[in-house]
Amino acid sequence: MTTTEMVKSLIFLCTALAACLALAAADWCQGTATFYGGPDGSDTMGGACGYGNLYNAGYGINNAALSETLFNNGASCGQCYLIICDGSRPGGQYCKPGTAITISATNLCPANDALPNGGWCGPGRPHFDMSQPAWENIGIYQAGIIPVLYQQVKCWRNGGVRFSIAGFNYFLLVNIQNLAGSGSVGAALIKGDNTGWIQMTRNWGANWQALSGLVGQGLSFAVASTGGQYIEFLNVVPAWWQFGMTFNTYQNFDY
């Protein structure tokens, strides 16, 4: 398969996924929400998407850890969800009426095997473990947990997509951050000054890997969002890059 054919195939897959997401987001879905991270949300930094400092990565304090059902093995990292408290269900007396909050998915809320059915984040349960400041926009603190309605929505970000580089020698691990539009990465390619396009694979969270010797070369990236949009970020990393550096761009996604 040629590079052009590979890119077209990736775009087709992402577009098909976007169509499914659009159908699913047409109506509100039921779920539940708890909170963590302390009153200032500082303990929500880091997480299973690999973003590290969420302010530096572009996500801020309105973030949440998603249950396994929603997290989708990291494919949902960066997506945005509009959440309201559902006053029509048990626990709804703890809702703050007329309020809503949009959060970014930045972490995984794992199942708790010590609890029946894995607890609130167990298999098959759509659950948001939100930063406490975000959660308190829609729920009364004393409740601890509230019923919610949610839907995936478009993400709005400041600035362009960011690429944070880790790894060693022939193992490159790139955390792709700050996506607008659908918010999440469907496919990624990398190219050195002396190479053609190399397909990357998801390692964990929002981290994409390439098993190639690219040290000492300037780097370009091509990313397809889960919304089906494809952007090439050309020559965004100079040849003098080192592991541990993050590089900003001026391009971002609409969908």
Image: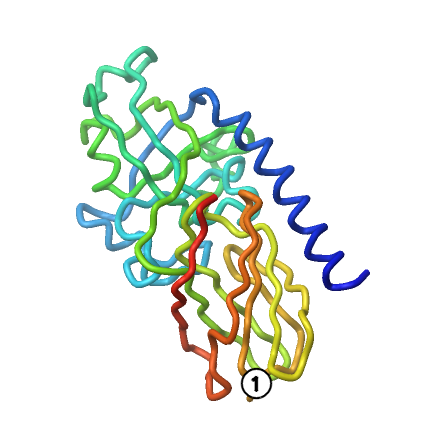
User: Element under label 1?
Assistant: loop
Q: Position of residue 100 (x, y in %)?
A: 26, 29
**117 shown above or below 240:** above
Does residue 16 appear left or right of residue 34 in this picture?
Answer: right
Numbered circles on residues, count: 1
Residue plotted at (44% across, 33% down): 152
Residue plotted at (38% across, 69% down): 248
| Circle 1: residue type | Gln
Residue plotted at (55% across, 25% down): 23
Q: Position of residue 50 (x, y in %)?
A: 44, 60
The image quarter in which residue 132 lies: top left
Q: Residue furthest top?
A: 88
Q: Residues within 10 Å of mark 1 (few under 14, many from 20)?
A: some
The image quarter in which residue 123 lies: top right
Does residue 201 appear left or right of residue 125 in this picture?
Answer: right
Q: Residue furthest right?
A: 1
**15 shown above or below 211:** above
Q: Which residue is mark 1?
A: 217
Front in this rendered view, residue 52 or 210 = 210
